[in-house]
Image: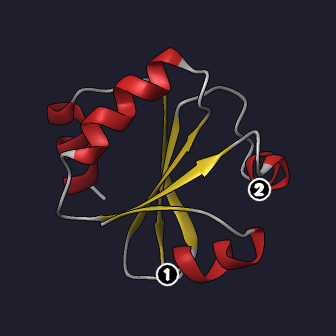
Amino acid sequence: MLKYLENENDFANEINKDMVLVDFYADWCGPCKLMGKVLEEMNSIDILKVNVDNFPDIAREFKVMSIPTLIVFKNGLEVSKKIGFISKDELNNWLSNN
């Protein structure tokens, strides 16, 4: 399920699940748009999209310096991070290893 973060206060609740993929992106970012198309095809995991322009404090907290940045959270804890565009196959392999 793909969901966009709408309120900074909801972030902690959204990542406090068995496994959540958070996509840090910006509307103006070309690679982010490509990554978004790949993520739209994913049905096997909860995905939370966080616009870094709207939520800079969250991006800073998780040391997001480049976008897109993908972070896997399990029960609210960061377990793995990927920076930059990755293909659907790479994404599936990475997620299966987490």
Task: Relative to 87, say whether 22 is above or below.
Answer: below
Q: Label 1 amino acid?
A: Asn
- Position of 33 compared to 90: left or right? right
Report the label total.
2
Q: Position of residue 71 (x, y in %)?
A: 50, 51
Q: Nearer the viewer, residue 53 or 61?
A: 53
Q: Position of residue 96 (x, y in %)?
A: 19, 55
Residue occupying the point 37% across, 72% down: 19
Residue 11 falls in which quadrant of the image? bottom right
Disc with the residue nearer the chain's start (2 vs 1) = 2
Kindly state the secondary structure of the residue where label 1 is placed.
loop
- Position of 32 compared to 60: left or right? left
Q: Which residue is mark 1?
A: 75
Q: Label 2 amino acid?
A: Ile
Residue 58 falls in which quadrant of the image? bottom right
Kindly state the secondary structure of the residue where label 2 is placed.
helix
Q: Position of residue 95 (x, y in %)?
A: 26, 52
- Position of 86 compared to 61: left or right? left
Task: Relative to 75, say whether 41 is above or below.
Answer: above
